[in-house]
Amino acid sequence: MKKRIGLLYGGKSAEHEVSLSTARAVTGALNFEEYEVYPIFITSDGEWRRGDRLEKPVSAIEELQFGDNTSILENNITDFLIDKNGNEVKFDVIFPLLHGTNGEDGTVQGLLEVLNLPYVGNGVLASSAGMDKVVMKQLFEIAGLPQVPYTYFIRSEWKSEQQAIIEHCENTLNWPMFVKPANLGSSVGISKAANREQLVKAIEVALQYDRKIVVEQGIVAREVELAVLGNDDPEVSVPGEIKPVTDFYDYDSKYKDGSTALIIPAELPVETVASLKELAKRAFKAIDGSGLVRADFFVTAENNVYINEVNTMPGFTPVSMYPLLWQHTDVSYPELIDRLITLAIERYEEKQQLHYKKD
């Protein structure tokens, strides 16, 4: 019997377009002989729109953006569980393909938990911790993972203590510094600052996206990423190296100009690869990960390793780093999707035994 899959994509975040590209790619990899696929589109204004069952992969993202003639679920978003005849639709699994705020930050995951629906990927805690770079770094610190020095503050503190914050950054960190919104992905809102003037400008840019800001110590190092897949006993892929033409791996480098070289597998000593894999697993467990995580590291010329961050819903098109890392670890894109669906159902069934067991 076919499994019924609900693809949940779009969203209100700055990564709306990235989510659409991901959804289109996933439809191209799903086996329509094995799955019944239903699109659930969240517009950039936050309206939920339900589409008809897909009979084949879509060829363009416009096919996934439903117009005004489609059912709007704005007043009751749980209507996606009801078909046109008023009957309940029983999904075997929801596949969230949402990036950024209101997508991979635990909010949608919380909704799906309340509705008692199986879903692909990380749960509420891992999603929210993985989205907030400050909380993530604090968890990594508790777990004993090496990372570069950093500081953080919120918008109200910047308004009232701007000079003190600048001086604190200069006294505790070295130039250059990287300024980031704490709760955003895909390098949106991130800037590099080499002096005080650039630091102030970078902070003002980041504050357009979030109320909490992270300032990190710059480091001369290679950017290396690994993909983690699993639940309690995760597997780790080969490492891949990012070589951007720009100063750092920004949004345009990731999604627009194609100027970044991805080297898979990364050329690293065997001992360094082993260390990276161990740290990737520890990071996954530190946030209580499940399903998938991409773990990003810095590797210095002396092969010292520092964790940068984890991404709980990494770029997921066939040319994104996460699927490419598994492709080079002998796991194809369609197989990767199948495994994620299986992991989601396994985790859901375990939860039912723990939380919904009848006396």
Image (cartoon, rainbow, N blue to C red):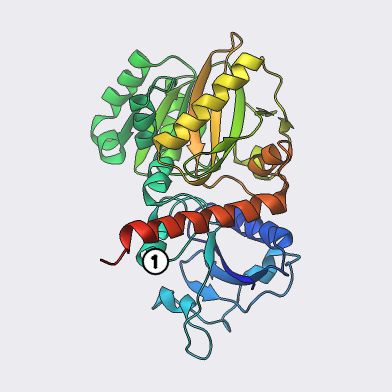
Foreground pick, 212 / 298: 298
Numbered disc 1: secondary structure? loop
- What residue is at 53 percent from the left and 39 percent from the top? 234
**Most extreme residue toward the left, as rendered?**
160
How many numbered callouts? Answer: 1
Foreground pick, 322 / 178: 322
Q: Quick check: 134 left or right of 224?
A: left
Which quadrant, please, contains the C terminus?
bottom left
Q: Mark yes or no: residue 320 visible.
A: yes
**Most extreme residue toward the front, as rendered?**
359
Q: Dot 1: few (<14), some (14–19), or many (≥20) neighbours within 10 Å?
A: few
Q: Quick check: 205 left or right of 15?
A: left
Q: Position of residue 85 (x, y in %)?
A: 52, 91
Q: Which residue is mark 1?
A: 116
Q: Position of residue 299 (x, y in %)?
A: 58, 18
Name the amino acid type tagged 1.
Asn
- What residue is at 63 percent from the left and 60 percent from the top? 23
Q: Position of residue 8 (x, y in %)?
A: 54, 64
Q: Position of residue 323 (x, y in %)?
A: 67, 44
In the displayed structure, 222 sits above or below 117; it is above
Q: Quadrant of residue 155?
A: top left
